[in-house]
């Protein structure tokens, strides 16, 4: 568990530091415009590299275990949104934070942490790679579609034409181009994982800085009280607790093998900050992005801590069962 936290802690601290910097020194005027262009360029490069990274072999192999992958997608894009609708309509929740909670539940699953937790828990790592990759790939289309269906943007009835153009030009087109160029650049990207990590985290930090800076200029912290933040944390804990329990029970009902049940629980219970930040930047007005991302960022930290503890428990449980089986064989 300490090794896992050592992976994520620097980024978590960087994220908190970026929010603090945006609070004290938000981007204004010409610098805000320049920072926005940089954030957009980072998002384009991020999705281009993710497209180049995705293996077609992983796609075809993943299709073989379709019941598991359908269960993960149903948890991510059906069960989660239903819970989001319920939580966002609870009395006493700030409307802006309620919008952020609902947006959180419409995002795809994480990739890196889902695979890491599955490995620690002694689950089916290959299936986790496929499920998480499918979720992120489909999320480029499904998340904006769900936003259009379930949310109000700019006071209208869904996603605007400009938002659709942003999704196509900033997210989908770079991803497709990167994947088409994979035969020529895939090896280069695979050999330089640190490059993808830098672009991944750097683009997120840029968007968070510009989004929170714009929100601070619009009076973010005068609208969100400590009581609202505490209530939001409780709602995130409730959401994660319900989804972890639900995925556990669904795996039992489907009679999945232990290794596949772990994949469903970890891939089906998480939401991607890496996808959520750029999508929010494209889908919502700049002044709204900061407050909408608050639930996403808070849920991200809670899911890492809770799932790390759960993964360690499952891993120790599997190791104990293995030792017991070997002892029985010797006897």
Image: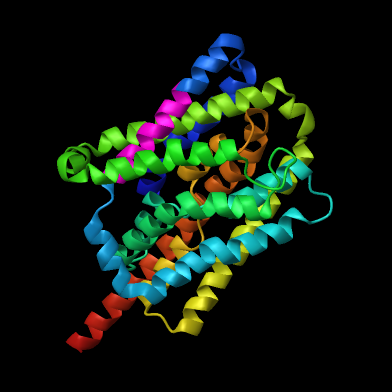
Q: Is residue 203 above or below residue 98?
A: above
Is there any visible trace of residue 311 in the rendered image?
yes
The quarter holding residue 22 reads: top right
Relative horizontal placement of residue 224, taking residue 125 as reference (left or right): right
The quarter holding residue 194 reads: top left
Residue span colored magenta = 38-52
Relative horizontal placement of residue 214, taking residue 191 as reference (left or right): right
The quarter holding residue 285 reads: top right
Residue at (26%, 65%) from the top-left corner? Answer: 60
Residue found at the far right of this picture: 91
Residue at (45%, 62%) from the top-left corner? Answer: 266
| 174 in magenta | no
The percent coordinates of residue 165 (x first, y second) are: 51, 38
| 40 in magenta | yes
Quadrant position of the C terminus in the picture: bottom left
Residue at (44%, 36%) from the top-left corner? Answer: 169
The percent coordinates of residue 273 (x first, y second) are: 50, 44
The chief SS type of the magenta part is: helix
């Amino acid at each position: 568990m300490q090794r896992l936290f050592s992976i994520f802690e620097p980024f978590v601290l960087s994220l908190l530091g970026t929010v603090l910097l945006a609070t004290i020194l938000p981007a204004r005027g010409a610098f805000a415009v320049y920072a926005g262009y940089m954030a957009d360029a980072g998002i384009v490069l991020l999705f281009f590299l993710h497209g180049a990274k995705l293996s077609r072999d992983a796609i075809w192999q993943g299709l073989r275990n379709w019941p598991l992958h359908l269960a993960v997608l149903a948890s991510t894009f059906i069960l989660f949104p239903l819970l989001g609708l319920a939580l966002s309509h609870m009395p006493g929740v700030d409307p802006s934070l309620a919008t952020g909670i609902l947006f959180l539940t419409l995002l795809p699953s994480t990739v890196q942490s889902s695979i890491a937790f599955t490995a620690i828990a002694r689950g089916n790592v290959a299936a986790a790679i496929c499920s998480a990759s499918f979720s992120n790939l489909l999320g480029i289309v499904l998340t904006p579609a769900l936003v259009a269906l379930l949310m109000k943007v700019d006071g209208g009835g869904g996603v605007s034409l400009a938002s659709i153009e942003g999704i196509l030009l900033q997210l989908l087109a770079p991803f497709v181009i990167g994947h088409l160029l994979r035969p020529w650049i895939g090896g280069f990207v695979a050999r330089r994982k640190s490059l993808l990590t830098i672009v991944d985290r750097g683009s997120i930090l840029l968007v968070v800085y510009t989004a929170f800076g714009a929100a601070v200029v619009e009076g973010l912290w005068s609208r969100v009280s400590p009581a609202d933040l505490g209530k939001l944390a409780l709602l995130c804990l409730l959401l994660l607790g319900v989804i972890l329990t639900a995925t556990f029970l669904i795996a039992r009902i489907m009679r999945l093998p232990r290794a596949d049940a772990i994949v469903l629980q970890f891939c089906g219970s998480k939401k991607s900050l890496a996808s959520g930040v750029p999508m929010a930047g494209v889908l919502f007005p700049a002044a709204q992005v900061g407050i909408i991302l608050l639930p996403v960022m808070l849920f991200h930290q809670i899911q890492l801590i809770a799932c790390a503890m759960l993964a360690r428990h499952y891993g120790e449980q599997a190791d104990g069962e293995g030792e017991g089986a070997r002892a029985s064989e010797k006897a």
